[in-house]
Each structure stands twice: as C-alpha cells, then as structure tokens.
Amino acid sequence: MHRPLFLVLLAALAPLAGRAGAQTVTLAASAPLLDRPGGRAVATLRAGSALEHGAARASHTAVTLEGWLDSTAVRPARSGEWQLIVRTPVALRRTASASAPVIAELPMNMGLKRVSRRGRWVEVRRDGWVSNARLPRSVATRSTARGTVASGAAADAPAPQGTSQKSRAATPAGGTRSRAATTTPLLAAAATRDSAPPAGALTPSRTATLRDAPEGARELGALAPNALLVPLLRDRGWVKVRVEGWVREDDVLPADTALRATLTAADLRADPNGTRGRQVRWDVEFLAFRTADPLRRDLVNGEPYVLARGPGSENALLYLALPPSLVEEARGLPALAPLTVTARVRSGRSEPSGVPVLDVLSLTRR
C-alpha cells in the first residue's frame, strides 16, 4: 500500500520545521567549539563550516554543529544526554560521503546526538559556543545585541561585583530591566574573559606539533586547537609562530646557560666587577624584611630588601633588593621560609659590609 505523496513530503520536511527560522554563519577561519562560553574546547571547527547560530552570552555565540561521520568511529553512549560517543578521532563531513568537505574534527570521547542514518554513515549534532572574535563582525555584533537586550541572556550573565542576589531578584515579575542593568554584566565579562585576536593571528586546526625548524627533528611541544598564534615568518610551507601563555615559575629554568651555570656568593665577592649585571637563579632562605639605611651604600636609602642566606647550603648573607610589585609578598614571609629567586647582580661586594646586593626579578616560595 502506497502512502499519499503529501504524507511522504510531510515526513521528509518534519525534521526541518523546528529550524526553519534558524540563521547560519560560515566561519572564515578555524575555531574551537566550546562546551560553554569561555569553556573547554570539545571540537575544532574548520574554515568554511556553516553553523546555525543563536543567542549570545559573555562575548560568545551559541551554535549548532551538524554533519556526517562514519558509524565505525562512534559507539553508543551508556547514559547521559548523548546517544553516541566518539571512539577514535574522526572528521565530520558536510554530507554522507568520504569525498565531502570536512567541517570539523572531533576528538575521542566527544559526546554527540544522533539525527539520522544512511548506510554506514550517521548524521550527528552537537550544540556549543564560539567566541564572537572568531565570527564575522556582522554576526558577532548582531548576536551581542540580541544577548544584551534579552532578559534570558542577562539572567545568565554574572552580576557585577558588589551586586547582591537580592537586588537582582528585586526586578518586578514581568517587568523590564533598564539597558544599563542588562548590558553591564555582559560588557564586563567580554572585557575580562575574551578579546579579539591580533590581526593575522592563527589557531591550530588540530593538535599541532611545534618544532625547532622547518622539517625539524626536535619537537618543542604540542599546541592545542584553541591556542592563539602570531605568525612571524613563513618558509617552505612552514610558519614560525609566537605563542603566549602562562606556566608556573618553578616549572621553568633560564634559557641563558650563563645564568644556569653555578655561581656562588663567594664568586660575586671575589669578582665584583666581572659579575655585575649577571643573572642568577638561586635557592635561598628568608631571614627578614628590611628597609635600607644610609650606611648601606649600594642600596638606596629607604629601599625595601630581603635579608637572605644562601645560595643553597652556602652560609652567606645576601641583600635582595625588591621591586614594588614584590614588597607586600616579601613583607608577609615567615622567618626561614625557603625561596627561589631570579635576580640580577647589582654589587658583588657592597660597602661597607661586603654583602652581595642583587635586584630581584622574581620570587617564589618552595
């Protein structure tokens, strides 16, 4: 028995009815798909990907990624909001074909919702967020405007410091908030959590290996898909980049081998002229926080400094002159606290005591 043609068409169009008014955006460059505004990257979106986009929050826009992948790359999810879990890294394609353009790269253990199936191909969907800095300016501006006037977006945005939950709840039911009340939290979040990348900046389309030279054999590290890279030089299909980030100070050493070489307090006193300006990284013991008096000629009168002992097991006194940014931290140190300092030699043998004076560049407790 054949189904009437209008019923066949109705069934085919049903999945599209809920998204008839959806707006799409095409990415001009690769970008990470985030699980929440400013959150963890869950996939890498390729340049040219067409995404449905919606509300904005904290300088990010909600998007929906949808495409096709080989069913052998996923397994059923045991529980939770996902129907499928990626079992091995896989390319998500625009259509159900191995020759179709890749629109995203999905990592292992990523959760997905199943949409449909066609032979060995399965259509999947994942909602997420993209930084407005990665979207075309017209879309980012329109999304931000929608997010700032929508009461739902304002409710999700963090309250400004000093604003109590009670005062936020005081908005009359069914009433409208003023523009200042809705935009201030979003603008504050945008200023502190995200900023536009520099002109020409790059981001890895997948986890990328950083090497010491084009075709270099030495690997320096791996760059995540959401890393921000500034191109410096291009050579034979390679690009030299600068990447900025933060690491714990006790996880790094000076790259200057002269700085890392053994240099003792006795060396400074023995060659006060030759060691002036040299940098050292020493483990010392904190003795006291002091302020210089006129008798210490190699310190400025009133200059804050640390009286320390070291380096290492060497039983020598040291004057560690402090920059303003480290004064409060040093003032609160307990006696005999073990420290690691990076410093530049000001005087290998100060007058009149003969104690070395060093200018502290960094100071951390061990």
Image (cartoon, rainbow, N blue to C red):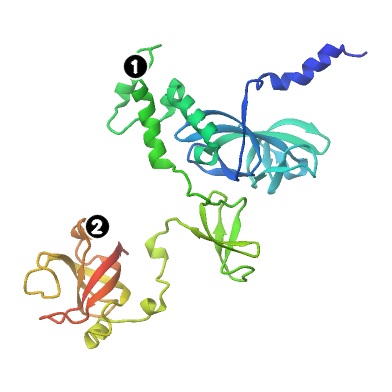
Q: Quadrant of residue 359?
A: bottom left
Q: Decide if residue 53 is in sight here.
A: yes
- Residue at label 1? 171
- Please report the residue visible at 60 percent of the width from the left and 54 percent of the height from the top: 207
Q: Is 13 placed left or right of 220 in the picture?
A: right
- Please report the residue visible at 66 percent of the width from the left and 20 percent of the height from the top: 20
User: Which label belongs to residue 325?
Assistant: 2
- Please report the residue visible at 24 percent of the width from the left and 57 percent of the height from the top: 325
Q: Decide if residue 80 is in sight here.
A: no
Is the residue 230 above or below the residue 259 in the image? above
Mark 2 vs 1: CB contact within 8 A: no
- Please report the residue visible at 28 percent of the width from the left and 71 percent of the height from the top: 343
**x and y percentages locating residue 298 in the rendered image:** 14, 75
**Earlier-in-chain disc, 2 versus 1:** 1
Quarter of the N terminus within the rendering? top right
* Residues at marks 2 and 1, CA–CA distance in whole angstroms: 42 Å
**x and y percentages locating residue 366 in the rendered image:** 32, 64
**x and y percentages locating residue 308 in the rendered image:** 20, 71
Secondary structure at badge 2 equals helix
Q: Quadrant of residue 164?
A: top left
Is the residue 178 above or below the residue 100 in the image? above
User: Which label belongs to residue 267?
Assistant: none
Kind of residue sitting beneath label 2: Ser
Furthest residue in direction left, as rendered: 294
**x and y percentages locating residue 95 in the rendered image:** 76, 37
Kind of residue sitting beneath label 1: Thr
Label 1 Cα crowd, 10 Å radius (few <14 / some 14-19 / many 20+): few
Secondary structure at badge 1 equals loop
Q: Is 278 placed left or right of 248 in the picture?
A: left
